[in-house]
Amino acid sequence: MKGIRAVLAGVLCAAAAACWSGRAAWAAPAAGNPRVVVVGGGLAGLVAAYELQNQGITAQVLDAADRWGGRVATVDYGQGLRSEYGMHEIWDANPLLEYVKKFAIPMSGPEAAYSSVILDGKYHPYVQDSAEKYFATLFTPAERAGYGRWLKTAEELYDESEAQGLTPRLADIQKSSFAQWVQSFGLSPKTAEFIRLLVECEVATDWANIGAVYGIQQLSIFLRETEQCRHVIGGNQKIIEEFIAALKGPKTLGALVTRIVRTKKADGSTEVVVHYRKDDMMRSVRAEKAVVAVPYHLLHSIQFEPPLTEQQWQAVDSLIPGLYTVVHFIIDARAGEKLLVDGKIPFPVLTRGPLGVVYGFLEKPEASQRELVFTLLIHGDYARSYLEPRDKIRQRLLSELDQLWPGFSGSVKDTHFYGYHPAATPGWGPGRSPLDAPHASLRSENVGLFLAGDYLYSSHADGAVRSGRDAARKIAQELKH
C-alpha cells in the first residue's frame, strides 16, 4: 500500500520460545537427525530452511504456534472476505518478491509509496495521477522546496550508509533522534508533520524515540525513485503455504523450544541439542547447527548454553519495541462505495491519532458484494490498549471514524482485534542503528548458533528474508567445506 511497509513479516506468532515449568514426560531424541534445526516458522525461519534445502542440507523447523507464517497472516471471514492481520504489502526492494515469482504466486497491481494524510485536521486524499500533483494540494511552493531539500539530504545519507556503513558523519548523526534531525532543517510545521506521519507508521513508535540513521533507513521507499508495493491476490498467507509445500524436511508445530545446548568438538565441528515441549512431553533433536528465528524479545525465554555474548545481549536489550494493533471492521459494501474520492480508492490514510493508518480496503467492492473488510493499523502509544476492554476501544475508534466519514459507524456489522504484545517490530533509539558494532555481532555465529529475524537488519519483512538467507549461506559454507 501507499507508504507503509506495514506489519511486516517477521516471526512473532512463530515464537518457539518460552520458559517451561512443571514436570513433563521425556521423549528420547529421534533417529535420523537433521543437520540443522530451525527454531521459528515465520519468514526468516522458512527462508533459512528453504535455502538450506536448496544446498542439499536437511533442516527441521520447530514452531510454538498452531500455524506457520508468524506475522504473515491472512484471516478468512467466509463468503470470500479475507484480510491481512500481519504483513500488508511487499515492496519492490524486498527480496521476498524473488520467492513470490519463483512460486508463481499471483500479485496485485503496483501501488504508490505516498498515502493520503490528515494534516492540520484536514483530510488530504491522494487520488492524483502523480506525487507532484498531490504535493501541490498539500504544500505551498516554499514548503515543497523545503521537503525536497530534506529529501535530497536523506537520499545522500542513505546511499552513504548502503555503500560505506557507519561512517564518521553517520555516527555523528546517529547520536540525535530522528525528530531532532528533521527539526534541524527548519522546515515548516506542516512539512515536519508530514515527515513524521511517514516515519511513525513504519517504526510504530514516536519519532523522538528512534535514532536519526535508523529513521532514514526506514524511509528508503521514498528515496530516489519511490518504490511501489503489491500484495498477494487472495492473501499473503499463500506465500507461507508455498514455502511449507516446498520444504521436504520435518516440520513441527506446537513445539515450544526452551533450551539449546551447543558444544564444539576437537575437530572444530559443533553439535547442537534443541530441547522443546510438545503435547506436554519434553523432546529433543540433535543437529550440527541451529538457526534461532524468533522475535528479539523472546530470545530471553530460551536457555542458551553457552550464552549469547555480552555484546550480543547488549544489542538485543537496547532495541526498542514498535507496537501495532490491527482492527478489522466488517462493513456494508455500499457504505464502502461512499468512501471513494472521484471514483478512486483513497486508502491508506495516515493519521497521528488513535486510528493510526486507515488501510480501509484494497479493492473496489463488486456489485454483488454485500460486505467488505475495513482495516486499521494502530501504532505506537495508541496500540498500548491490550488491557482495555475491547468495547471501549471499538467505540473510541468508531467515534473517530465518524468524524472523518459521518455515519460510518452505522455501516459496521462486526469488529475483530489482532494485537501483538509486547512488541510487533524492533527499533533503534538515538545512538543506535542496525549499522553499529553491537548489532553486527548478532550476525556472527556463536558456537553453532545463528540468529535470524527482521531485527538483524531492519524492522520489517525485508530484514527477515535477508537474515534467513544470510544464516543459510554461512551454514552451507561451513557444512559443505
Image (cartoon, rainbow, N blue to C red):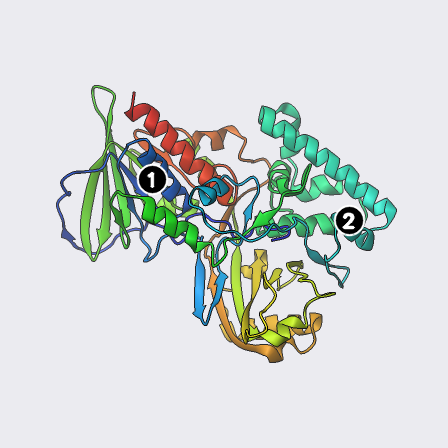
Q: Is residue 238 left or right of residue 66?
A: right
For mark 2, what is the residue?
Answer: 191
- How far apart, in angstroms, are the residues tagged by discs 1 and 2? 44 Å
Q: Quadrant of residue 263?
A: top left
**Residue at point 53%, 35% (across, down):** 434
Mark 1: amino acid: Ala
Disc 1 crowd, CA 10 A, few/some/many (<14, 14-19, 20+): many
Residue 275 visible in the picture:
yes
Where residue 262 sits: x, y (%)? 25, 33
Q: Mark 2: few, some, or many residues within 10 Å (few <14, many ≥20)?
A: many
Residue 460, horizontal then vertical, whole percent? 51, 45
Q: Which mark is residue 285?
A: none
Mark 2 residue type? Thr
Q: Work out whether residue 477 or residue 195 is closer to the camera in this orientation and state it.
A: 477
Q: Residue at x 52, y 60 (%)?
A: 325
Q: Position of residue 106 (x, y in %)?
A: 49, 51
Instruction: From the viewer's perspective, tell me whether residue 353 is left or right of residue 263.
Output: right
Front tag of 1 and 2: 1
How many tags in the picture?
A: 2
Q: Residue furthest right?
A: 141
| Left/right of residue 301 with respect to residue 339 in the rendered view | left
Residue identifier under label 1: 49
Residue 13 or residue 246, whichever sits in front: 246
